[in-house]
Amino acid sequence: MPPPRYRWPALLAVLLALSALSLAAGAGRVGLAESWAWLLGQRDDAHVVMVIEHLRLPRLIAALAVGGALGCAGVLLQTVTRNPLAEPGLLGVNSGAAFAVALGFTLLGTLSLAGQMAWALAGALVGAALVLLLARAGETESSPLRLILAGIALTATCHGLMAWLLMSRQESLDQFRFWSMGSLARLTPELLWAGMPLLVAGFAGCMLLLRPLSMLTLGDEQARGLGARPDRIRMLAMVCVALLAGAAVALVGPIAFLGLVAPYFARGLGAIAVPSQLASSALFGAALLLAADIAARLIVSPFEAPASAVIALLGAPLVIVMVRRDALLSLTRTGAE
Amino acid sequence: MPTRLFIPALIAVVLALSACSNSGAETASAAAVAPAATRSIVDAAGQTVRVPARAQRVIVLSEIDLDAALALGVKPVGATNGRGQGGVPSYLAGAAAGVASVGSFGQPSLDRILALQPDLILAGGNADPQLLAQLAHIAPTVVSFKVGESWRDSFARMAEVLGRGDAARTFFAEYDAAAKQLAVDLQGNAGATVSIVRWTAQGPVYMLGDAFAGRVLADVGFARPKPQQASGAGHSSPMSREALSQIDADWIFLGAFKTGTKADPAGFARLLQEPEFKELAAARAGHVREVDAALWTSVGGPLAARQLLVDVRAAMLGQPS
């Protein structure tokens, strides 16, 4: 592993290289030479301009934004629940979205892409809200454990209802299975822009929570001593997670694993404080999703592989390497380690 | 309930329930023995089955069975896919009015099948031996088609099973005449290439060479774009939108599922405005049509085939048949 001061530049360089590759790689006849010419400002070939500006650039932006969002959401959730195994799906976001999309297909027969995104977003936000309510029900303070249990309960319920809906209608299942594999191929620029405000709101929330979250890592008692309100911080962090992960699942479908794995990489790189964990996890998430998306278009070209499957294939070996380096089991790795 | 009473009570309930199901099975086998005249046929799975000479109470477990039975003038007493879930394909809804539901596709309810006292069950392409064995206890059960088989072969076999060979011959003659007439009427569009596509959340998929709709189009003399001639009865993987030129053709039929009356449930009007779509020759010529996916991109059947000819006529000639 490189010495600490080279890590940030290295991470940024990787991201930049992947971004360039993502503009140059694809199934069409637009290759490296054409992409390079486009970067240098040539706009003669309408097809090249269309492919790069209308198809590849939105995908690049989506991969950066969604990957970054899942990376941030992972850190937030792991910090707040003090559980290194927590991932954004735990908040009921993915299962809520999946159930809503299945319901939409069943009720309406079919959904446009915009319709699928709207149903997914609604389901994700309702799912997250339910989990947060369940975790607080009857208590003044929500504890991390209650939250995790509420998330598991809602996921199981949604899964059961969804399976029932899909079994009862072949056509819904037929359409749902395409939705259920997360992929960046589905995005059109308008839909991407429609989802951006939520992501921006989520990222802005993260920035505002940097200091309070740092206090929270000292423990509730200490944080209270410093004038923070732990329960409120947790709640706000959850709202950010819901916005980030909800927008992510609406835009590209369920991408498991990324929100779990990116914070690990960040810590493995030596990020200890919450701000640096968030930043490096976001960069990692973006880079990983970008790499997965590039692979997804190339490995079965001219067809598309689901990016969610590629993430799992890419991410799992990396986690194993990191586990073997013993770099990730503690959440904050303070002084003693 | 006191705990010590709970277990005995549970046992009593289980015994009572199993007694019920036993008596049910007995009446069913009694009903199955009754038929007067039987014939021996070989089903799609290669099994020899004794079926009634002219089955009266038929239950169908797949949409191609339902389609074929209705085409032969046999109205089944039960069919899979609950109507409440919009299960019966919309193009059959009229003809299949009054047919009882026996559960969802792939998971028929044995209780409901039993209650309808069928004298024949068409099990579709289902080869689940356990289910077939259970069904065979209720009534003679026939695997009616092989997966990927031409609808003509399946239909001919079902006609034989149902003892309606004459009706099938009449249907084939009418269908072939309609296909021939369409080919003549097409003039400028005769021999055009036709692309059959579905739009999914991961991108477009096209139907492969042996898929139902492709066979029907071949009857009219249409060719498919080269990638769509690959063998296979299903559809391709989702395609990259950069490679959309591979689905281009003289005409594109885009399949969408619908339940309601909404004109464009899949939002194709919007899709057609995307720049990558506007590059296609078919789009520039205004030759993209939205069609019912339950008809065009499913397993099909004789009535579906006939309806496809109607759809093609409407698309290319702008007139009903």
Image (tube, coloured by chain):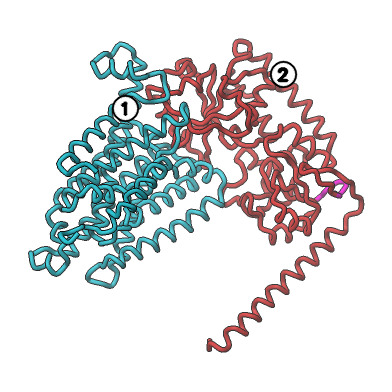
Q: Position of residue A152 (x, y in %)?
A: 38, 62
Residue at 71% in and 18% down: B181
Q: Are marks 1 and 2 on the same chain?
A: no
Whether residue B272 is situated above or below residue B146 in the rendered picture = above
Q: Is residue B222 magenta?
A: no
Q: Which residue is mark 2?
A: B180
Secondary structure, mark 2, is: helix
Q: Which residue is mark 1?
A: A21
Residue at 42% in and 21% down: A28
Kind of residue at badge 1: Leu
Q: Position of residue B170 (x, y in %)?
A: 81, 30
User: B255 and B85: which one is in front?
Assistant: B255
Locate residue A15: give its quadrant: top left
Callout 1 crowding tier (Cα within 10 Å): few <14, some 14–19, many ≥20: some
Q: Chain of mark 1?
A: A
Whether residue A327 is situated above or below residue A54 in the rendered picture = below
Q: Marks 1 and 2: which is nearer the front?
A: 1
Q: CA distance from mark 1 to mark 2?
A: 52 Å
